[in-house]
Image (spheres, rainbow, N blue to C red):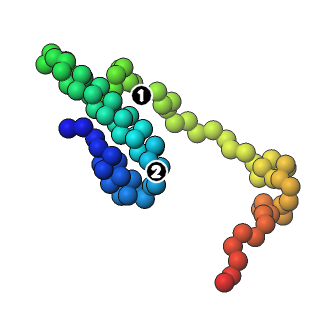
Amino acid sequence: MPVTVQDVEHVAHLARLSFTAEEKQLLTMQLNSILLYMEQLNALDTSGVEPLSHVIEVQNVFRPDQVTPGVSREEALRNAPAHSDEYFKVPKVISER
């Protein structure tokens, strides 16, 4: 079933998008070419192909958790543009209404 300009207008309305007449024509042609390609793929015999979730074999590449010492407070505050003895000072970003 080919995509019509009315289909593109309907989906655009649902997505709250606006297109010019030329853009609607272009989108209609592009969507129809995608559907034609999908029909070509559907014509392939995939009965002997095992379903998979990834194209390549995926293995867990995470490293094991290791506890390491963190940065000291003095080191963290050393390059701060403004700080008190224990905290970073930042501009106020929340105001009262």
Q: Which residue is mark 1?
A: 60
Q: Is residue 20 left or right of residue 53?
A: right
Q: Is residue 43 left or right of residue 54?
A: left
Residue 93, quarter of picture: bottom right
Q: Nearer the viewer, residue 40 or 64?
A: 40
Q: Which residue is mark 2?
A: 19
User: Is residue 97 among what the camera can see?
Assistant: yes
Q: Is residue 13 left or right of residue 46?
A: right
Q: Alpha-carbon distance for marks 2 and 1?
A: 44 Å
Q: What quarter of the picture does the N terminus occupy?
A: top left
Q: What quarter of the picture does the C terminus occupy?
A: bottom right
Residue lying furthest left in this view? 47
The circle drawn on residue 97 is none
First along the sequence among labels 2 and 1: 2
Q: Amino acid at mark 2?
A: Phe
The structure residue drawn at horizontal position 41% and vertical position 28%, both measured from the top left corner, is: 60
- At numbered mark 2, what does the secondary structure look like: helix, strand or loop? loop
Return the x and y of residue 11 as percentages of the image width and height. 34, 52
Question: Where 69 sits versus 94, above or below?
Answer: above
Residue lying furthest bottom in this view? 97
Residue 83, quarter of picture: bottom right
Which-is-in-front pick, marks 2 and 1?
2
User: Is residue 86 among what the camera can see?
Assistant: no
Return the x and y of residue 55 as percentages of the image width and height. 34, 22
